[in-house]
């Protein structure tokens, strides 16, 4: 038997040149020598993360089962996901502890900032979001470090608590990611990137001379601005590296839908996310589902927001179910499409941690506890229904920390976490 290599190279090994440190990709030398080929393929395959934010939650009585574990009786909503039982976990009794009631807490859904960061709608002091935190560690290996998609409130935030911009037009994004430009367009893009770098260099020099003349509060503002410039420079450098590399070719034609075609828009976003993951264009995606306004869905006679604020009116609850069942069917089809794609002997769903969640557990009462949370794929063991105390919730940030670890990132904490959630396996 071939001896197992006990002198492993750390993935944190760095190449140093001219003061620049570059992290090595995962190499065979970093894997135990005794691993079989299929185990090596499993370790080499990239891991992805997709976060999906819903502003109006999901009607809890139609979502959460009575029984915990794998053999729960499927609820009205979970019947839609029944063909995928074993590929996802529904979690009840979980939230960001101490958050006030209100729609405005949506901005902190994926940050888990302490309650002092979301005191009121006018007093938001956010921190880094889960997508940005993960992309900062794995995003340099792909054309795009991370993607923030959809229309709605900002859910992606950098380390300084500044919102990251979202791409709201599918056709524009599709062209950016998958349509090859003409030689003139590529040259023009190269000049644009070079000019942008030059401008940022000049601004950085001016800021350095300016900061010594300012008071403490202004220096803080300048520091925030400097952080944004550094991030812009990093994006420019990565864009420049990929400018002359061919874009992946995909067989898909996006469409422009009006606001009333809510479910069709969501399905198309899921298609784009699948293509992004399948082509390894990015490994971190955050998708924001906006409110549906007055969506065109058979049987629906009132607006989405009106139905979600039902006040226990049975007719409105039934109208809400029409909307949410249509959305969950689109989500189930998205998961099934990922499960149907093979990658190094594993499905794309197995290699992608998919989270769908909301900041509201009860949109009608604006309550921010008992949030609707579903985690799918990602290689988790998926115990079925994880049921925590619905009066004394577990910290949602604990689950985020577990997802971070599943991405292969060694982090001691995230947001308001106290420990990584062990129940996902």
Image (spheres, grey):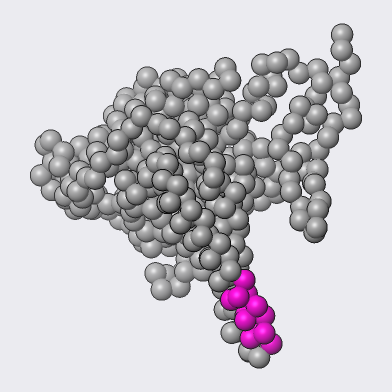
Residue beneath the point at 12% across and 35% down: 298
Tag count? 0
Q: Position of residue 166 (x, y in %)?
A: 41, 55
Q: Position of residue 173 (x, y in %)?
A: 38, 47
Q: Is there any visible trace of residue 383 in the rendered image?
A: no
Q: Position of residue 289 (x, y in %)?
A: 34, 48
Quadrant where the N terminus is found in the figure: top right
Magenta span includes 333: no
Residue beneath the point at 57% across and 53% down: 240
Between residue 106 and residue 292, name the one nearer to us.
Answer: 292
> For the view shown, which residue lies furthest in the front direction?
184
Q: Position of residue 50 (x, y in %)?
A: 48, 40
Look at the picture and state if 153 lies above or below 245: below
- Range of residues picked out in magenta: 201-212
Residue beneath the point at 60% across and 75% down: 202
Look at the picture and state if 368 lies above or below 419: below
Q: Is there any visible trace of residue 244 in the rendered image?
A: yes
Residue beneath the point at 47% across and 69% down: 124
Quadrant where the C terminus is found in the figure: top right
Between residue 176 and residue 119, name the one nearer to us.
Answer: 176
Look at the picture and state if 47 lies above or below 96: above
The reply, left or right, for residue 252 in relation to residue 347 is left
- State whether the magenta stretch is mostly helix, strand or loop: helix
């Amino acid at each position: 038997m071939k001896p197992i290599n006990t002198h492993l190279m750390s993935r944190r090994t760095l190449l140093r040149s001219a003061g620049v440190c570059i992290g090595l990709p995962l190499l065979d030398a970093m894997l135990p020598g005794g691993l079989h080929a299929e185990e090596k393929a499993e370790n080499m395959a990239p891991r992805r993360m997709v976060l999906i934010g819903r502003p109006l939650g999901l009607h809890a009585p139609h979502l959460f089962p009575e029984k915990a574990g794998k053999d729960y009786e499927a609820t009205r909503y979970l019947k839609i996901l029944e063909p995928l039982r074993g590929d996802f976990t529904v979690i009840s009794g979980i939230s960001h502890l101490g958050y006030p009631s209100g729609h405005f807490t949506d901005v902190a859904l994926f940050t888990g900032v302490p309650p002092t960061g979301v005191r009121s709608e006018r007093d938001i002091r956010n921190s880094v979001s889960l997508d940005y935190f993960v992309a900062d560690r794995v995003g340099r290996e792909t054309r795009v470090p991370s993607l923030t998609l959809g229309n709605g409130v900002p859910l992606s935030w950098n380390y300084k608590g500044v919102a990251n911009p979202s791409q709201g037009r599918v056709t524009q994004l599709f062209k950016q990611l998958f349509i090859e430009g003409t030689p003139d367009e590529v040259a023009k893009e190269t000049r644009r990137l070079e000019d942008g770098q030059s401008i940022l260099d000049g601004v950085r020099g001016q800021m350095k001379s300016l900061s010594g003349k300012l008071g403490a509060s202004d220096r803080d503002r300048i520091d925030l601005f400097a952080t944004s410039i550094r991030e812009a420079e990093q994006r420019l450098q990565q864009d420049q590296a990929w400018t002359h590399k061919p874009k992946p070719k995909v067989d898909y034609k996006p469409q422009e839908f009006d606001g009333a075609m809510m479910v069709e828009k969501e399905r198309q976003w899921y298609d784009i996310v699948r293509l992004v993951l399948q082509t390894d264009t990015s490994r971190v995606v955050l998708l924001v589902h906006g409110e549906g306004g007055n969506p065109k869905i058979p049987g629906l006679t009132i607006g989405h927001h009106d139905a979600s604020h039902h006040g226990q009116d049975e007719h409105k609850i039934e109208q809400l179910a029409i909307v949410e069942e249509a959305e969950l069917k689109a989500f189930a089809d998205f998961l099934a499409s990922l499960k149907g794609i093979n990658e190094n002997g594993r499905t794309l769903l197995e290699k992608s941690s998919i989270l769908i969640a909301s900041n509201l557990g009860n949109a009608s009462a604006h309550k921010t506890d008992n949030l609707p949370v579903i985690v799918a794929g990602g290689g988790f063991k998926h115990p079925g229904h994880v049921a925590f105390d619905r009066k004394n919730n577990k910290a949602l940030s604990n689950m985020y920390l577990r997802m971070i670890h599943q991405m292969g990132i060694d982090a001691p904490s995230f947001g308001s976490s106290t420990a990584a959630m062990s129940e996902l396996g």
